Image: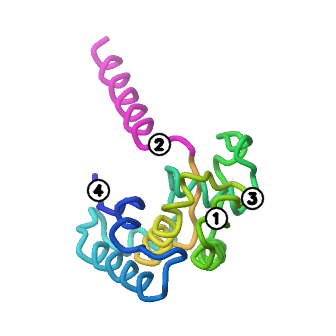
Amino acid sequence: LLSIPLGAAVLTERFLRKDPPDPRELSELEEAIKNILENAEFPFKEEVIRGLSLVGTGGTVTSIAAMKQNVPLPEISPENLNGTQINSSQIEEIFDKIKQCPFSERAILPGLDRNRAIVIIAGTLCVLLIMQHLQVDRLYVSLSDLLEGVLLDFLENFRVVEETKI
């Protein structure tokens, strides 16, 4: 298991002071994210991940999917977004749009919660740079989170252990 310190809120607070951010701020943010990714010790060889897809969870990925699909906030649900496929060029389009918008404009974009509008620029850039770093072009959306995955994995392993005791 690998955890990389790329939280959208922390990165926004640390690098993005202007609204909308200026090119220098975005450049510094990009360099910081790239440095973190370069120094991370991924538990797999790079050639293993090439050509595979990523599954993204959490608020940033959900927001990106909802904006891509123009899903209004009340309609954001696993039924409407789970399994949505997004490629890097679609995420780049969203990023290019939101990085130029002041908060007041981002906050009213379809699919973007007002509270998420503060951190969506840094979060979206993280997603893009992770995809570039891993040389992956597709991202599948899951509204389930990592904790749910860990729990399901635990329960599956528990069931196997219980079955072997019988």
Could you tell me which quadrant the C terminus lies in? top left
The x and y percentages for residue 60 are 52, 57
Q: Which residue is the site of mark 2?
A: 145
For badge 3, the amino acid type reads Gln
Mark 1 or mark 3, earlier in chain: 3
Mark 2 or mark 1, earlier in chain: 1
Q: CA distance from mark 2 to mark 3?
A: 20 Å
Q: CA distance from mark 2 to mark 4?
A: 14 Å
Image marks 2 and 3: residues in contact by CB distance under 8 Å: no
Q: Quadrant of residue 147?
A: top left
Secondary structure of the residue carrying tag 2 is: loop
Crowding at dot 4, Cα within 10 Å, few <14 / some 14-19 / many 20+, comes out as few
The x and y percentages for residue 92 are 60, 77
Q: Which residue is the site of mark 3?
A: 69
Mark 3 or mark 4, earlier in chain: 4
In reply to whether residue 97 is colored magenta, the answer given is no
Compared to residue 53, the image places residue 62 above or below, namely above
Crowding at dot 1, Cα within 10 Å, few <14 / some 14-19 / many 20+, comes out as few
Q: Which residue is the site of mark 1?
A: 104
Q: Nearer the viewer, mark 1 or mark 3?
A: 1
Image marks 4 and 1: residues in contact by CB distance under 8 Å: no
In reply to whether residue 155 is colored magenta, the answer given is yes
Would residue 121 appear left or right of 63 to someone viewing this image? left
Secondary structure of the residue carrying tag 3 is: helix
For badge 2, the amino acid type reads Asp
Give the magenta range. Answer: 143-166
For badge 1, the amino acid type reads Ser
Q: CA distance from mark 3 to mark 4?
A: 29 Å
Instruction: Determine the residue positioned at 34% across, 83% down.
Output: 31
Q: CA distance from mark 2 to mark 1?
A: 29 Å
